[in-house]
Image (spheres, rainbow, N blue to C red):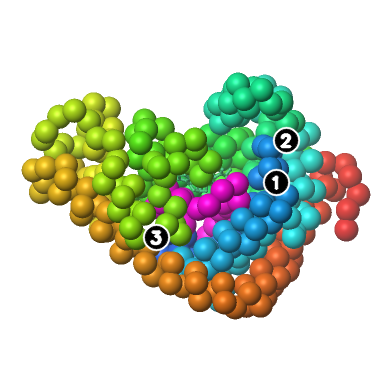
Amino acid sequence: MTRVFSGIKPTGHLTLGNYLGAVRRWAEVDQHRTDALFCVVDMHALTVDHDPARVRRLSRQAATLLLASGLDPERCTVFVQSQVDEHARLSYVLECVATDGEARRMIQYKEKAVRERDRGGSVRLSLLTYPVLMAADILAYGTDEVPVGDDQTQHVELARDLAVRFNQRYGQAFVVPRATHPEVGARVMNLQEPTSKMGKTDDVGPGIVYLLDEPDVVRKKIMRAVTDSGRDVVHDRVARPGLANLLEILAACEGGDPGELSGAYRSYGALKKDTAEAVVELLRPVQRRHKELCADPAYVDGVLRSGAEKARGMARPRVDAAYRAIGLSAG
Ligand code: AMP
Ligand code: TRP
């Protein structure tokens, strides 16, 4: 059976981008047709300035939201990265296979490093090695497919390269994974700045729809979305990025095609209204279930505990084999 692995960082509250680009597909498709693991990758949240208590709180909230989005512990494994030692164990070995040039070429590293320096901060070494830890997350489980948004393509490529190189140098240990993306929604843009991705920690807060935003907040954010100077409704990502983003969000919610949907609208106002309502309806069941799960913390604890145990059992033999292959003693 196909093995799927994907992860989400608890660096902020989950967004509509996370949901449309990744989580919804994990719940609706991946967990039903594959042997899937979904992980709150909390170690990745330490690569930038962070508050320890907040990371713990957000990890818990992310895990709860994954369950609220429909991940079913009977069908897939849901766990928190730091509860499974194999990720860090394998990451070190992969650091001995990756090159520093390779790590420095990562677009996200370059962008985030500039941002940190512009803020007068220093760049943590873990920000540079982060894609290697991500490769370890993936390779530890013999993963075939990694369902992610577009922004993670380059990182999954690195995981592929490291798997191939390790296998060639030290003997067959890893499956070579590939990224998969949703047809629509793989790159949801910030509503106020439609040329940048809707990220959890953006400075442009009003342009981000969070999964736990109240319906009226969602409506307000979408109705105030920046659109372009033009009157006709057409789908053109380059010339009309704000409009294209709304059409893509609506298409992702309703399962249509953004180009075809554009033909149904004569005004921006009507499009915004329908998009806002579609998002409110999309989030409604997730928010309801989230509330229920928050009232039952023992259930969430139990899911995460048994998820970590299962994940450990799956990763351990492969990581041990990689240790032995590269010249370490293990097991
Ligand atoms: P992150 O929030 O960076 O941990 O991302 C978790 C998952 O959500 C990854 O698969 C990302 O590619 C995806 N994702 C994050 N932001 C967006 C976005 N704006 N549009 C589509 N997918 C996204
Ligand atoms: N780097 C990913 C992101 O920022 C999160 C992540 C960490 C991940 N490890 C992973 C995604 C393994 C897929 C597989 O979104």
Marks 2 and 1 in Cβ contact (< 8 Å) = no
The residue pinned by badge 2 equals 126
* Residue 319 falls left or right of residue 215: right
Q: CA distance from mark 2 to mark 3?
A: 35 Å
Q: Earlier along the polypeptide chain: callout 2 or callout 3?
A: 2
Name the residue located 68 percent from the left edge and 30 percent from the top edge.
Answer: 128
Name the residue located 25 percent from the left edge and 52 percent from the top edge.
Answer: 275
Over which residues does the magenta segment extend? 1-23
Marks 2 and 3 in Cβ contact (< 8 Å) = no
Q: CA distance from mark 1 to mark 3?
A: 25 Å
Q: Earlier along the polypeptide chain: callout 1 or callout 3?
A: 1
Where is residue 57? Give x, y as percent. 65, 58
Question: Is residue 258 shown above or below 165?
Answer: below
Secondary structure of residue under mark 2: helix
Question: Is residue 13 shown above or below 108?
Answer: below
Name the residue located 68 percent from the left edge and 33 percent from the top edge.
Answer: 127
Instruction: Judge depth for marks 2 and 3 and give the one in front.
Output: 3
Instruction: Answer few, some or many: residues within 10 Å of disc 3's Cα (few below 14, many 20 plus, some between 14 and 19).
Output: some
The residue nearer to you, when weighing 270 against 102, is: 270
Q: Residue 201: which numbered mark, if any? A: none
The residue pinned by badge 3 equals 214
Q: Is residue 174 visible?
A: no
